[in-house]
Amino acid sequence: MAEKKIPYKIYLNESEIPTAWYNMRADMKNKPAPLLHPGTHQPMTAEELGGVFCEELVRQELNDTDPYIAIPQEIQDFYKMYRPSPLVRAYCLEEKLGTPAKIYYKFEGNNTSGSHKLNSAIAQAYYAKQQGLKGVTTETGAGQWGTALSMACSYFDLDCKVFMVKVSYEQKPFRREVMRTYGASVTPSPSTTTQVGQKILAEHPGTTGSLGCAISEAVEVAVSNPGYRYVLGSVLNQVVLHQSIIGLETKAALDKYNIKPDMIIGCAGGGSNLGGLIAPFMGQKLRGEADYRIIAVEPASCPSFTRGVYAYDFADTGMVCPLAKMYTLGSDFIPAPNHAGGLRYHGMSPVLSQLYADGFMEAVAVPQTSVFEAAEQFARVEGILPAPESSHAIRVAIDEALKCKETGEEKTIVFGLTGTGYFDMVAYEKFHEGQMDDYVPTDEELAVFAAKLPKMEG
Amino acid sequence: MAEKKIPYKIYLNESEIPTAWYNMRADMKNKPAPLLHPGTHQPMTAEELGGVFCEELVRQELNDTDPYIAIPQEIQDFYKMYRPSPLVRAYCLEEKLGTPAKIYYKFEGNNTSGSHKLNSAIAQAYYAKQQGLKGVTTETGAGQWGTALSMACSYFDLDCKVFMVKVSYEQKPFRREVMRTYGASVTPSPSTTTQVGQKILAEHPGTTGSLGCAISEAVEVAVSNPGYRYVLGSVLNQVVLHQSIIGLETKAALDKYNIKPDMIIGCAGGGSNLGGLIAPFMGQKLRGEADYRIIAVEPASCPSFTRGVYAYDFADTGMVCPLAKMYTLGSDFIPAPNHAGGLRYHGMSPVLSQLYADGFMEAVAVPQTSVFEAAEQFARVEGILPAPESSHAIRVAIDEALKCKETGEEKTIVFGLTGTGYFDMVAYEKFHEGQMDDYVPTDEELAVFAAKLPKMEG
C-alpha cells in the first residue's frame, strides 16, 4: 500500500478528550416521553426516582434542557486510563471488499470490560460514591455491563452486586470470574434471594432468566438495602448522555481531518452505544446544521425498532421499574434460545425511540448467521475479533460499502465497533459448526407479547 | 488528581513507529553461541536451517553483525493496524502503593492475539508468503502464539497448522475457537498424526503434552510437506529481533518526555518479550552509552535462568530441532501440573542467555500465588486484566516500587505488560478459590533433568 494521508488510527491527544457530555434531548423539539410511576401512571418525580437511582443521576435523567453537562475531573481522570479510543480507518477491509467507500470505525473494545459500557459505569459509580453510598446493584446479560460496573466500583471502592441472567451465568463462567477479580458478587437470576426472583421461579420453574427479570431483582435489592442504589447500563437517558463521549471523540477525530461522514451505523439493543455514537451528529441534524443517514441495526430475532410498538411499557419483567415510552416487543419477550448475538432487550432507549418516531433515523434488522459471517470477514482482515453485538453494525457497514462498489460512490461510512468477542467464543463455535439458525419470531408470536402491554389512560 | 505533565498514555504518531528492527547481537562482544546440528553437533549452515525455516528468517537468525534490519513496508502497514502500543504511566497504581517511584508499562495486549506475539507472527508470515510457501506449522502452549500466527496467516492467505499442547487444547476451547475463526487448523499434541507424536504417546501414554513435544510435531510436519516451513514464537534470535519493536517504541516514547528509566523489568519464558523490550536499552549498555538495571522475571516453578544450566540443549522433546546453547532445565522438564502462570518453556533465548552469563542483566524467580496477587491488585487500579505471564513483571515492579517507598527514592520503573488474561480465567478462578499452590521443583528433581542434557565434545 502507498503512504496514507489519513492514518490507520486517528487518536486524539489526551487534552482533546471532551470535558463535557452532550445531551441530545436539549436540541430535540419533541422530548422523549417522561418515565411514569408503575402504579399511578403519573410522571415520576425526582424524589420518587431518588429511591432507586443516585441523586445526581436522577437530575441527569430528567434534564432535557442543558445541551452540555460537565464531566467531573475524577471521571475525566479515569477516562484517560483507556480513552481516547481510536477511530480506525478500515483500509484493509476496504481493499478486501474492493469498494470505493471510505470506512471508519470507532473502536471501544480496548479496555478490560471489552466494550463501551465502561463509559457510563465509571460515571454512575462516581456519583454513587459522591452520594456516600455503600454500593450499587445491577443486572447483566452477556456480562459486558457487569464487568464494566465491577471495574468502576473497584476503582471507587464501592460494593457491587450483580444479578446475571442464569443462562449467561452458566455459559460464561469466565465473565463471572472477571467480575469476581474486580471484587463484585455475582448471583444467577432468577435467584431465591429476592421476592421477585422467588415469584418468577414459582411461575416459570426452570427458566433460564432474562434481562427484564434480573433488573427486577437488582432493583428490589437496591431499594431494600440502605446505602444502595440501582444502576443500569443502557436504555436510560443518563446512559445515552454518558455514552456521548463516543460520538464527541468520533466527531473531533473526523473534524481533525475534515472528514464528513455520509452515514453513521450502530448496533442497537437498549440503545446506549448507538445513542452515544450518534449524539453530536444528531445534534447537528436536530439543529438543521448538517444531515447524515443514521442507521440502527438490530437482530432480526429481537426487532424492537422494526417490528415493535411505540408505547409505554415496563422496563422489567417484575414490573417494579418505572414505565418508559419506547419501541418495545413487550416486557415478557425473550429471544429464541438459539439467538447468540446479544442485543436481547425487549425495549429501546426512549430518546432513540422518539428520534426514530420523528424520522431522524433509520433502522434495519439482520439475521444472525449473516452477522457472524461479517464478524469473521472483519476479524480476518482488520485483526480485531468483534463482539456479536458490534458485528451487527459491521454487517450493515459492509452491505453499504458493497452498494458503493456497485454504484461507484465514494461514500464515507462510520460505524461503532462497540467491543470484542473474547467471551463469545461459544457463539462463534456454533457458527463454525453450522449450529446457528436464523429463527425470526412470527407476527403471531409478537402479537401475543404486544397484547400484554400495560393499558394506559387516555 | 492534579493536571499531569506526563500523559496517562504516551502514544507515538504512526510516523514515529520504528521502520527498522534493532539487532542486539551486532553490539554484543560475546555473540550468542551458534545453533548446532542435532546429529553432527556442528554449527548449522544456512542451507540446513533452510529446510526447516524460511530463507529470509534464516538470514536474520544468523545475522549477528547488522545492528538495524529494515522492516518491509507490508509489515509496517500491518503494524499500523494495532501499533504503536501505548506506554502507560501507572498513576493509579503509584497512588495505591503510595510510592514515590514512577511506574510505566508498555502495554502489548491491545490486539486480538492479546499479546506481543503478533509482532513476530506477522513478520514470519510475511517472509513465508514472499518465499511463495503454501503454509507454516507451529506449536502453541497457552495459545497466544498460535492465535497471533493464525491472524497473520489469515492476513497473507497462508495455511496455518497449529499443534497445541493437549492440556491447553482441552482447557482452553475458546483459544482454539479464535484460531479457527482465523482459519487455522488446530491439533492437540501429542497427536497420532506424526511419527514423533506416536513415539511420545507410546513412551508416555496419557501425557498431557508439552511445548517441547508440540515443537517436534510441528517441525516434522513442516519438513515432510512441500511448501511448508516451521515458525516459532520465542527463543530464536529472529523472534527477539522482531520483538525489538516493543523496546524501540518504548524508548522513543520515553525520549519524547526526557524520561530515563532506572530499571526495565520483563517476564521471561522463552525470552521473546523481554528481549524485545530491553533491546535498545541493552544496546546502549553494550556500547557503554548508558546503564540500566535489567531484570528478567521467571516463575519459581520453571526457573531456567535462576536454577538452570548454561549449556547446549535440545529445543524440543523429540530432539529433531537444532541444539541451542542456553540456560535450560533440560528438554524433558515440564512444570508441575498446578503451574498456571505460563512461561513454561524449559530453555531461554540464546541471546538473553549470553547477556545474562556476561552479567548484563539480573534474573529473579517468583512464586505463582504472589504473581496472581499482583495481577489482581493491578487489575483493580489500572483496569487492565493482565495475563498471568505479564503478571510476573507486575509482581517485581510492585516489589521495586515498594522498596522505593521505604527508601524514599523516586526511581523510574518500566515494565512490559505483554498481554491480557481473558483466556486465563481458569487460573484466576483457581486463585480465587484458594486452589493454587507454590510448588517449586527440588534440587534433586532438577538434577534428574540436567543429567539428561546432551553430551558435547570438548
Image (cartoon, coloured by chain):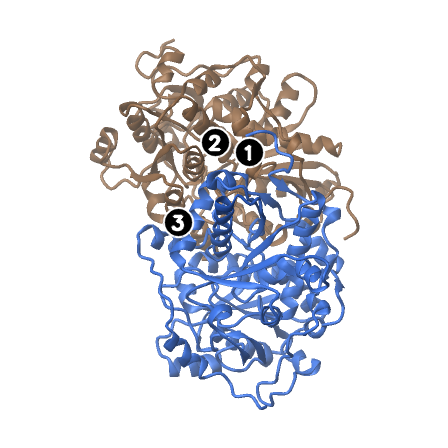
Chain colours: A blue, B brown
On the rendered structure, is B270 left or right of A183? left
| Secondary structure at numbered mark 2 | helix
| Secondary structure at numbered mark 3 | helix
Task: Name the subunit of mark 3.
Answer: B
Task: Name the subunit of mark 1.
Answer: B
- List x then y, in percent, for residue B185: 33, 39
Instruction: Determine the residue located farthest toward the front in the rendered image.
Output: A407
**Residue marked by disc 1:** B79
**To which quarter of the image does residue A125 belong?**
bottom right
Marks 1 & 2, CB-CB < 8 Å contact: yes
Dot 1 surroundings within 10 Å: few (below 14), some, or many (20 or more)? Answer: many
| Secondary structure at numbered mark 1 | helix
Sequence-first tag of 3 and 2: 2
Sequence-first tag of 1 and 2: 1
Q: Residue B234: which disc?
A: none
Instruction: Determine the residue located farthest toward the left in the rendered image.
Output: B202
**Residue marked by disc 3:** B174
- List x then y, in percent, for residue B119: 51, 32
On the rendered structure, is A229 left or right of B230? right
Q: What is the three-letter code of the residue carrying label 2?
A: Ile
Q: Nearer the viewer, mark 3 or mark 1?
A: 1
Task: Name the subunit of mark 2.
Answer: B
Dot 2 surroundings within 10 Å: few (below 14), some, or many (20 or more)? Answer: many
Sequence-first tag of 3 and 1: 1
Q: What is the three-letter code of the residue carrying label 1?
A: Tyr
Could you tell me how far apart the alpha carbons at marks 3 and 2 are, in whole angstroms?
22 Å
- List x then y, in percent, for residue A208: 39, 71
Q: What is the three-letter code of the residue carrying label 3?
A: Phe
Q: Nearer the viewer, mark 3 or mark 2?
A: 2
Dot 3 surroundings within 10 Å: few (below 14), some, or many (20 or more)? Answer: many
**Residue marked by disc 2:** B122
Residue at the spot 45% in from the left edge and 52% down from the top edge: B425
